Amino acid sequence: MTSKPDQPPVRHIAVAAPHPAAIEAASEAIAAGGNAIDAALAAAAMLTVVYPHQCAIGGDLVALVRRPGLGVTAVVSVGASPADVDVDALAREDRMPKQGAQTVTVPGVVAGWRALDGLGSRLGLGAPLRGAARRAADGFAVSAGLARAIAIRTDELLADEGMRGVFGMGDGGLAVEGDRIVQPALAATLEQLAVDPDAMYSGSIGASIAARLRALGGAHAEADFAAHDAELLDPVEASTGGVRWWVAPPPTQGVVLLGILPEALGDDVAELVAAVHDAALVRQSQLGDPRGGPIDIDAMLAPRSREQQGSLPRAGRALGDTVAVTAADSDGTVVTLIQSVYQLFGSGILDPATGVVLHNRGSAFSTDPAHPGRIGPGLRPPHTLLPVIAETDELVLGLGCQGGSAQPWILAQVVAELLDSSADPTTTLGRSRFVIGARDLGYEVMTLVAEPGLPAAEAAARGRDLPVVTTEGLIDDAGHVQAVRLHADGRLDAASDPRADGRALVFDTL
């Protein structure tokens, strides 16, 4: 009797993303021999084509990567304001503009991809960028989520030459669900980046974007783009409730989530609402860029330990529009990547020459020179992107979401159940949630916005004299959560939030 030759072990890779095309791109990367990092990069590149209302290569990126034997690394690619920004003129304004050239900071996505590639991808950046370029050239059908965003931002899209060129339908109207969008300029840009990623910062792509922004009143120079690079940093780590947690450091708001974990892991809804309210106040008054001077991290890690005055920065509405991609490999690698244009369609500017939609991260700056989140030359705005990795004896969880400043509260409502290895993650993400915010949600005062079926949260808010708004169904404001879990027995599972257009799959690979 002859024995069969040894077979290579089967590995598994789980991916969750907010659009089917991103999962298709991840599948292609895995089939080509890619790992979890390759899958995440492929999905992320594709999303800049098919989800331009939420992310673009004209936005920022923050990610966490857990590698076997190497711990967790934070990738922070958050762009700064121009060196020649007119701080004095902005200080005379009550708050930053919501959109326009003054709200554009140097985009960090491409540098972030390059940094992620260097953490152990097998395929490099060329393949995912060429795949995204093909989709941009061939076109895609407008999804339900993109159609909602176009309807909300109709006036802004019609006002910009580049936006009209991509999303206009030739009859004076804009695309609706099912219409086909083709982006030849973006396709050419992605093809160029596949050959030379540096073109975004020290080549023709960055030069074109800087020139377009100057023509629209910005202070951007090619030198501002050349000065940008992604940072590879140690994450902020904590142990709470028998769980190890990792988040990215400021200027991102990861520490805000750490500050409310004790209540998030409990079962008292009133205590969670109280903690979220306190944390929302301290975040708005304390988060900023450490490059500009000390910020009170201790206050954000312990928001209930002191009386909060609730001072609001002089900033515009900061409701975020973002994509999260999560991926896990049975070898122990876990990736959670978040990239964003901030608000719907970001600054409302699309550079016609490159096809790049530009974010409005700068709208989150404060115009108050005394605020930790103040605008200044080379400073980065308070940042909402919040990838999370958590680990217990039973599993490793990779988590991220859309949701702007509300991301800590969104994630706080799902982490306890997701850390239960017996819980179904898809069911968890479909449950109703609440968010609390002020200008970041479009209100002048702190308000609790609740999806249906949350009477305890509504009662707790009213007990703290918070206005309450109840929605008729699930809403985008409550976040698009993407989750992957690597169990101690090697099993993988994943879930994509039903509020988005996405999917989650587990792939087998050799």
Image: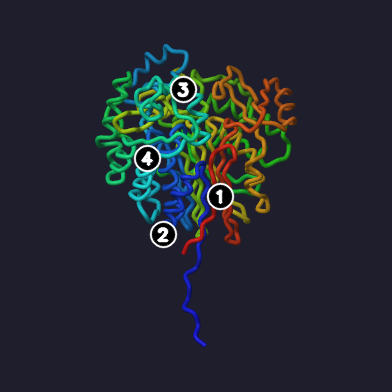
**Foreground disc of the pair 1, 2:** 2
Q: Secondary structure at mark 2?
A: loop
Q: Nearer the viewer, residue 384 or 186?
A: 186
Question: In terms of secondary structure, where does tag 3 sit?
Answer: helix
Q: Earlier in the sequence, mark 3 or mark 2?
A: 2
Q: State the colouring used for the structure image.
A: rainbow
Q: CA distance from mark 3 to mark 2?
A: 42 Å
| Residue 33, label in figure | 2
- The residue singled out by tag 1 in the image is 484
Q: Which residue is denoted by mark 3 in the rendering?
A: 154
What number is the disc on residue 136?
4
Vertical position of residue 71 compared to residue 222: above or below: below
Q: Tell me how many marks there are.
A: 4
Q: Where is residue 357? Give x, y as percent.
A: 38, 31
First reached walking from the N terminus: tag 1 or tag 2: 2
Look at discs 1 and 4 and give the one toward the viewer: 4
Residue 105, image x and y in percent?
Answer: 38, 28
The image shows residue 294 at horizontal and vertical percentages of 46, 29
Q: Dot 4: few (<14), some (14–19), or many (≥20) neighbours within 10 Å? A: many
In primary-sequence order, the first of circles 4 and 2 is: 2
> Is 193 rendered above or below residue 53?
below
